[in-house]
Image: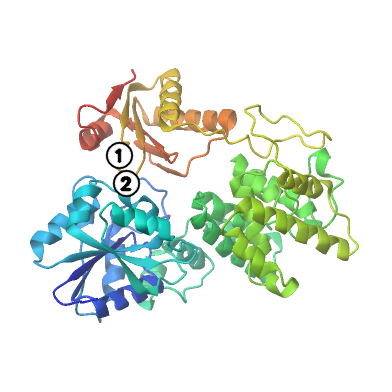
């Protein structure tokens, strides 16, 4: 491809910038006359320690890219008031620089490319420079479909390194910084950034976990994050469950009261049941999906959630397992394609391994394999117990798929039931890839913001098995992302300031609920 008089825009959170980012930017700088790196704005409502602020992210980027003369780090999206769409950024740089524009995107973004805001206009203004990411190989049918829709796709001759900002945050907690530019590492250490999970990791020694076990936990967490990205799982839940999955591995030294149904479990699995109790009592994590992911990571369960499957499989495919079983590489590849098929293979390997050691295979493992080999038809009936009667606390309520409109109206009703007011639904279908609906409600106090959020979260989780992809909140605003629907609960003054209705409503797509 010709690089004369052409520029490329490369956007992302860069939270933090990694060596993978730097490698991509260096390669782009050798192909294009100008590279503009655009860090995106990040919600101010994330938990403290979860992200770096805009200034720190920009400084880390600029220091890490100081030797590349044709690379510019732009504050455009960070400084822009309100929501910034890619097309807004493109229009801005179209006026700033008189040259053809490419947008560098990872192959994982192609699936929803045609749903980007004002895609019909965007595709006439730019070429898309696609960088292949591991686990997101581009299918010919998708490529042909996008090109027929008018997208001008250019594919790089290099692949993006298999490393992400999420993995960098995990590394930082374990004091591992090899994959982060040294210039960024200094800032991270000086400001104690990415410390959200320190409260878990610092407890490892208190629970008598040796260095070898801690390294296994680290490798499992890395594997879990990689699978979570491929299978679109909640990264915060995945990281917490992975970090805690072996917290009770030295269980013989712990004094933990187990529910009676688990007291007869074999020694090789008892730590998972004890670990679940620690997650609830010591770490004060009450979310069922996380607790059950820890509880069943050694045995499986017929009603495993996506999170539980991810932790079970990550534990089975982390790199050191290759030494134990030559089939691990095949299982690792399968787990990236199908969680359920991988569960069958993993359970078969587990049973064979346990039996080869002359140990007892716990009945739940046989039950789980039977379930995945012969899955029952989907049912809307809640699971109360299993036929053998051993199970008392459900691992997960069956996941019931609702269309976005149905889910949005359920959320609105729950908010109304709990005395939320000025409730509106905004239909975003075809307008953005962010979500299909916003549900917005006002609250009278910070206490009510919290109460409304917890009420909806609990109702959807307990009654319908629906878990959010992400929770962002502070005292004045909670934003809960359910994928197709995002719920916003705001104090009146906060709502007036951000005015989401003005940003997202065109007059025809706003529905007043109360």
Residue 349 falls in which quadrant of the image? bottom right
* Coloring applied to the structure: rainbow
Q: Is residue 240 left or right of residue 29?
A: right
Residue 324 falls in which quadrant of the image? bottom right
Q: Is residue 59 left or right of residue 396?
A: left
Quarter occupied by the N terminus: bottom left
Element at label 1? loop
Nearest to the observer: residue 401 or residue 211: 401
- Tell me if residue 109 can be seen: no
Tell me the residue at 72%/72% (across/down).
326
Nearest to the observer: residue 61 or residue 504: 504
Image location (x, y in percent) of residue 155: 33, 69
Q: Is residue 243 left or right of residue 495?
A: right
Label 2, label 1: how many angstroms apart (C-alpha)?
Answer: 7 Å
Tell me the residue at 62%/40% (across/down).
288
**Residue 115: which numbered mark, if any?**
2
Image location (x, y in percent) of residue 71: 22, 74
Mark 2 vs mark 1: which is more N-terminal?
A: 2
Nearest to the observer: residue 395 or residue 431: 431
Which residue is disc 1 drawn over?
430
Asked if the residues shown at circle 2 and circle 1 are in contact, with their CB atoms under 8 angstroms apart, the answer is yes
Nearest to the observer: residue 312 or residue 368: 368
Tell me the residue at 59%/47% (across/down).
306
Quarter occupied by the C terminus: top left
Image location (x, y in percent) of residue 236: 50, 51
Image location (x, y in percent) of residue 226: 52, 61
């Amino acid at each position: 491809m010709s690089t004369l008089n052409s520029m490329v825009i490369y956007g992302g959170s860069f939270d933090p910038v990694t060596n993978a980012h730097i490698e991509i930017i260096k390669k782009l700088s050798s192909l294009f006359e100008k590279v503009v790196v655009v860090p995106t704005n990040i919600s101010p409502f994330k938990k403290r320690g979860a992200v770096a602020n805009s200034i720190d992210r920009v400084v880390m980027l600029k220091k890490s890219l100081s030797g590349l003369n044709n690379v510019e780090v732009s504050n455009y999206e960070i400084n822009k008031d309100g929501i910034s769409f890619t097309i807004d950024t493109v229009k801005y740089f179209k006026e700033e620089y008189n040259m053809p524009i490419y947008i560098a995107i990872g192959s994982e973004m192609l699936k929803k490319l045609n749903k980007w805001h004002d895609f019909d206009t965007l595709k006439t203004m730019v070429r898309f420079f696609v960088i292949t990411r591991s686990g997101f190989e581009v299918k010919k049918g998708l490529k042909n479909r996008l090109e027929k829709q008018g997208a001008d796709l250019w594919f790089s001759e290099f692949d993006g390194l298999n490393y992400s900002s999420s993995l960098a945050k995990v590394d930082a907690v374990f004091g591992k910084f090899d994959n982060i530019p040294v210039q960024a590492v200094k800032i991270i250490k000086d400001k104690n950034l990415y410390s959200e999970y320190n409260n878990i990791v610092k407890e490892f020694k208190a629970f008598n976990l040796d260095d070898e076990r801690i390294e296994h936990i680290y490798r499992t967490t890395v594997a879990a994050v990689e699978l979570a990205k491929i299978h679109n799982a909640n990264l915060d839940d995945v990281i917490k469950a992975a970090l805690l999955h072996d917290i009770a591995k030295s269980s013989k030294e712990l004094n933990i009261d187990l529910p009676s149904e688990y007291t007869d479990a074999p020694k090789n699995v008892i730590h998972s049941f004890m670990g679940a109790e620690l997650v609830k009592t010591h770490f004060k994590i009450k979310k069922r999906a996380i607790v059950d992911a820890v509880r069943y990571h050694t045995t499986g369960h017929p009603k495993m959630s996506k999170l539980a499957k991810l932790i079970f499989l990550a534990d089975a495919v982390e790199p050191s397992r290759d030494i134990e079983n030559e089939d691990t590489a095949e299982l690792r590849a399968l787990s990236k394609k199908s969680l359920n098929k991988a569960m069958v293979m993993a359970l078969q390997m587990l049973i064979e391994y346990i039996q080869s050691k002359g140990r007892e295979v716990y009945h739940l493992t046989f039950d789980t394999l039977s379930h995945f080999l012969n899955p029952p038809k989907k049912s809307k009936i809640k699971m109360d117990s299993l036929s053998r009667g051993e199970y008392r606390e459900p691992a997960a309520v069956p996941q019931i798929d609702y269309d976005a409109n149905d889910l949005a109206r359920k959320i609105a009703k729950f908010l109304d039931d709990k005395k939320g007011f000025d409730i509106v639904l905004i239909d975003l279908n075809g307008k953005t890839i962010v979500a299909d609906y916003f549900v917005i409600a006002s609250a009278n106090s910070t206490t009510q913001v919290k109460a409304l959020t917890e009420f909806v979260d609990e109702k959807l989780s307990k009654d319908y098995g629906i878990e959010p992809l992400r929770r962002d909140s502070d005292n004045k605003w909670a934003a809960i992302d359910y994928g197709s629907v995002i719920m916003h609960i705001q104090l009146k003054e906060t709502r007036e300031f951000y005015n989401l209705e003005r940003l997202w409503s065109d007059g025809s797509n706003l529905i007043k609920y109360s």
